[in-house]
Amino acid sequence: MSSPQASALVGEFSAIVGSDNVMTSEIDRYAYSYDAAVLEPVMPGIVVRPTTSEALGRVTRLCNDNGLPLTVRGAGTNLSGGTIPHPGGVVILTNGLTRILEINEEDLYAIVEPGVVTAVFAQEVARRGLFYPPDPGSQTVSTLGGNVAENAGGLRGLKYGVTKDYVMGMEFWDVQGNLIRSGSRTVKSVTGYNLHGLMVASEGTLGVFDKIILKLIPPPQAARSMMAIFDSIAAASETVAAIIAAKIVPATLEMMDNFTIRTVDNFRKAGLPTDAAALLLIEVDGHPGQVADEAARVEEICRRQGAREIKVAHDAGERNTIWQARRDALPALAKLKPTCVLEDATVPRSKIPAMIAALGEISRKFDLTIGTFGHAGDGNLHPTILTDKRDKAEWQRVEHAIEEIFDRALALGGTLSGEHGIGLAKRNFLVKEIGQATIDYTARMKKALDPKNILNPKKMEG
């Protein structure tokens, strides 16, 4: 945005949201120039923080009237560049829209503003004796609006699904500042197009979220967690496929390779078996009788597939130790090198053994350190490349390795992203998965809804 235009618009934005909620200094703007992806920051022209629904709609319309690209930002935990702004554009913050408007215990739904932190919401729901299952790794800081925009997953995705499975409806602003409503508080609703479904995973390119209706469910009555220890990563990955093939759907079924195990143990001194080639972290839940039966069957499958030991949690403390080890994987790995590239190549669950083998080949081929962990039960692996972006030669190898990871995942019938989104980081690979005709189709839809292309431009464009 030009200097005269910026000066005039600061006054207009201030009139809508208050001068304290308009940020123009270089240091303030820089704070919102990047997200958690390994991409270069881009300076926005202005940062605006609405605190009411009406203000959010008016800010959106003002941006459109002036042709200003806007990027909506929650906590900036996005891993694919989805919240990196357009040069000189507007960043709209949602951290002033943090109200849980309703938790309905009779009809099992909640209505929230987009800036509500995921873990805060889940805790409040649990306090009412209910359960909101989606649990992205960033849940202690990520926001529900961001979760919806990226269709965030998490450890419980295997059994309980991901964010899209809990979005019952939504109100959002179009570029002209009109409030659009879709879905309802009822379990069944087929009134009009499924616009709220279209908004899920749209990465802020089709509308600006105002209110979200989320489904809640009763919590499981019982749960049992265990750690299966393997001397072969191939055996561990084949065990994942065997558990699913046995028609058992654990609440969580996670994997960690040896490098990740050793790194996590060094990070927290958790007493993990650092000589193990791989760990499977498994939890079954449901009715107590069902839990006992499924846990016994899972243990039997693990032993049959070659697990040398199975440690079952006997109390809440031991259960927390198991899952804290998994949640420590990324922060522990990130401490080892200046640059940490976290991918989320995802394949059909039966192809996990083949994908694990492919990651080993890629690591050796490009001479890179790759720690692998992730949601093995739903095919969503997180190969994590540890590097230093300042080393140009190594970084070039990293880029080639990432492309090969994508190619191998697609060849196995998988997808570019299970939960991180496309954003800027993966848009150039999009054509490989969905084809040019699909990209052109979505571009026509985007142009109809956003003729000036102000909503998070350049994201997911292929």
Image (spheres, helix red, strand yellow):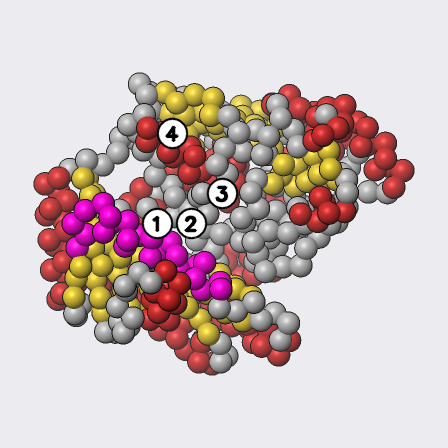
Of the two numbered discs 2 and 1 in the rendering, the one whose residue sits closer to the viewer: 2
- Say which residue label 3 marks: 141
- Say which residue label 4 marks: 124
Q: Residue at x 86, y 35 (%)?
A: 7
**Mark earlier in primary sequence (3, 1):** 3
Quadrant where the image shows the N terminus: top right
Q: Residue at x 61, y 47 (%)?
A: 83
In magenta, the rendered stretch is 312-335
Q: Are marks 2 and 1 in contact (CB under 8 Å)?
A: yes
Left or right placement of residue 98 versus residue 378 in this view: right
Q: Are marks 3 and 4 in contact (CB under 8 Å)?
A: no
Q: Residue at x 45, y 43 (%)?
A: 140
- Say which residue label 2 marks: 137
Q: Residue at x 49, y 42 (%)?
A: 142
* Amino acid, disc 3: Val
Alpha-carbon distance for marks 2 and 3?
Answer: 9 Å
* Amino acid, disc 2: Gly
Q: Is residue 121 above or below residue 228?
A: above
* Amino acid, disc 1: Leu
- Say which residue label 1 marks: 155
